[in-house]
Image: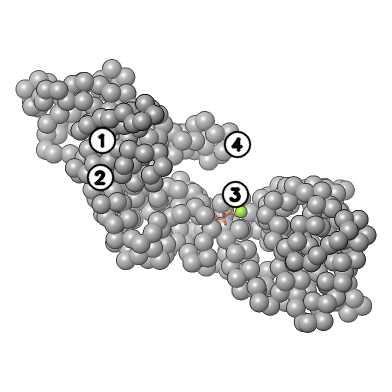
């Protein structure tokens, strides 16, 4: 049974690609969307919106484009590292305006004809630049010149710039003064509040299926604390928390699952540069969680003898001398047992022994799994079929684990 089936969901509720069907109209998202619509309706010329990474800027654009696709001609530029000519050609291509000559004057003339023709039909022409912080200065200047294309009565072209906060800083610089003055609307997208984060999680779960998994209040609070209300981070941690609960065989997601997810994200983020504040927080949280998890393991080995219902995290005694192995006789030793100890920050667990299969879950470094069988494929790659704590079975690549014979005693 894969994890979606386990939770009664038809798809992953916390995908990190912007998806129209999952749009949650928070107060902030709604405000930006409304002011964008108003700016286009009123032919304001320029619209600027900035926000931290992952706050939902591209998602808002998708909603806007969906609503306006029949009322306007829209060119969407997603990779704006283009010089002025390349930029103009990309825009005309989006508008399906054929340009025979690549001479700049010809291009501008073709564009002006298109603007006038579309305006006569009563349609708006909108150029949207996502990730606009990457626009070179000379292309921004070209946009300013384009915005001069107007009739005596009205502006022919609406320009929407969306980007990260550095875009606003860039436009505030002295040499951008002329352009900056034309930005009549400047919006900033803020993250979700605590109560919106709670609603957002429930909303996505309901959209993805019957909403069987439930995040308890403490779990949701920790998600908000970790993510600071940034939807992409909410998705990342909520998705991994679901996985943790699935491995645990639990349909209710608690704080321990969220902690585990945060620890896992910290492992993944360790090597990444530029994750600054969040990374620092994650690493600090991760460290705290490692201490908590180690404490829990010690507790479980020494004091807790009933079957485990938590994640199958068992310490490798060689790697971690601080964690004691249970006394002989307390647990029944099984001869010939092999264990796979995860040695990479995150190892995929797959339904079949193939890298082409979609992982059903993951295990982080130090997790110990019981090996049922091993095989070598045609390309000499080792695979191990392993058992999870709720008896489900899956495959893990030999590249991601160290195999140990009878190293830890099992019940
Ligand atoms: N209002 C929302 N409703 C539903 N999902 C959202 C919303 N806002 C953001 N998300 C989700 O958060 C994730 C990040 O959103 P998005 O890509 O739109 O952010 P962004 O601000 O464009 O980020 P970046 O600056 O990195 O481009 C996506 O998975 C998206 O589905
Ligand atoms: Mg984006």
Closer-to-camera residue (298/240): 240
Mark 1 = which residue?
385
> How many other residues sit within 10 Å of disc 4, few (<14), some (14-19) or many (≥20)?
few
Q: Which label is found at residue 274?
A: 4
Q: In terms of sequence position, does the residue under pointer 2 or pointer 1 come before the other?
A: 2
Name the spot of residue 110 as percent of width and height, x first: 87, 66
Residue placed at 66% from the left, 77% from the top? 70
Say which element carries label 3: loop
Quote the CA–CA distance across marks 1 and 4.
Answer: 37 Å
Mark 2 = which residue?
248
Position of residue 108 in the picture relative to residue 262 (left or right): right
Residue placed at 75% from the left, 66% from the top? 96
Pointers 1 and 4 in contact (C-beta within 8 Å): no
Residue placed at 89% from the left, 62% from the top? 108
Label 3 beta carbon less than 8 Å to ligand 1: yes
> How many other residues sit within 10 Å of disc 3, few (<14), some (14-19) or many (≥20)?
some
What is the number of callouts on the image? 4
Position of residue 169 in the picture relative to residue 191 (left or right): right
Q: In terms of sequence position, does the residue under pointer 1 or pointer 3 come before the other?
A: 3
Quarter location, residue 260: top left
């Amino acid at each position: 049974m894969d994890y979606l089936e386990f939770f009664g969901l038809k798809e992953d509720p916390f995908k990190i690609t912007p998806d129209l069907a999952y749009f949650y109209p928070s107060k902030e998202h709604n405000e930006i969307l409304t002011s964008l619509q108003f700016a286009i309706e009123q032919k304001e010329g320029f619209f600027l919106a900035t926000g931290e990474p992952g706050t939902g800027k591209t998602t808002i654009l998708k909603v806007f484009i969906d609503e306006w696709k029949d009322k306007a001609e829209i060119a969407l530029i997603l990779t704006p590292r283009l010089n002025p000519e390349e930029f103009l050609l990309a825009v005309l291509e989006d508008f399906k305006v054929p340009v025979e000559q690549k001479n700049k004057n010809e291009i501008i003339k073709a564009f002006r004809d298109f603007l006038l023709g579309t305006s006569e039909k009563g349609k708006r022409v909108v150029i949207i630049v996502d990730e606009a912080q990457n626009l070179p200065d000379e292309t921004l200047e070209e946009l300013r010149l384009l915005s001069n294309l107007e009739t005596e009565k009205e502006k022919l072209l609406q320009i929407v710039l969306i980007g990260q906060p550095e875009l606003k800083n860039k436009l505030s610089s002295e040499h951008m003064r002329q352009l900056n003055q034309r930005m009549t609307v400047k919006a900033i997208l803020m993250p979700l509040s605590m109560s919106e984060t709670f609603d957002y999680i429930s909303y996505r779960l309901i959209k993805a299926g019957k909403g069987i998994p439930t995040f308890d209040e403490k779990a949701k609070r920790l998600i908000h604390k970790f993510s600071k209300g940034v939807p992409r981070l909410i998705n990342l941690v909520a998705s991994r928390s679901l996985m943790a609960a699935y491995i645990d065989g639990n349909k209710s997601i608690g704080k321990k699952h969220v902690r585990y997810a945060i620890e896992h994200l910290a492992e993944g983020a360790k090597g990444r540069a530029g994750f600054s504040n969040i990374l620092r927080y994650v690493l600090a949280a991760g460290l705290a969680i490692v201490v908590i998890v180690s404490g829990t393991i010690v507790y479980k080995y020494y004091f807790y003898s009933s079957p485990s219902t938590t994640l199958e995290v068992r310490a490798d005694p060689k790697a971690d001398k601080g964690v004691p192995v249970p006394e002989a006789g307390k647990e029944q030793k099984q001869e010939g047992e092999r264990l796979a100890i995860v040695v990479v920050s995150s190892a995929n667990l797959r339904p079949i022994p193939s890298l082409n299969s979609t992982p059903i879950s993951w295990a982080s470094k130090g997790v110990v799994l019981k090996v049922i069988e091993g095989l070598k494929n045609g390309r000499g790659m080792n695979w191990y079929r392993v058992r999870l704590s709720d008896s489900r079975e899956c495959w893990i690549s030999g590249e991601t684990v160290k195999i140990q014979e009878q190293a830890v005693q099992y019940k």
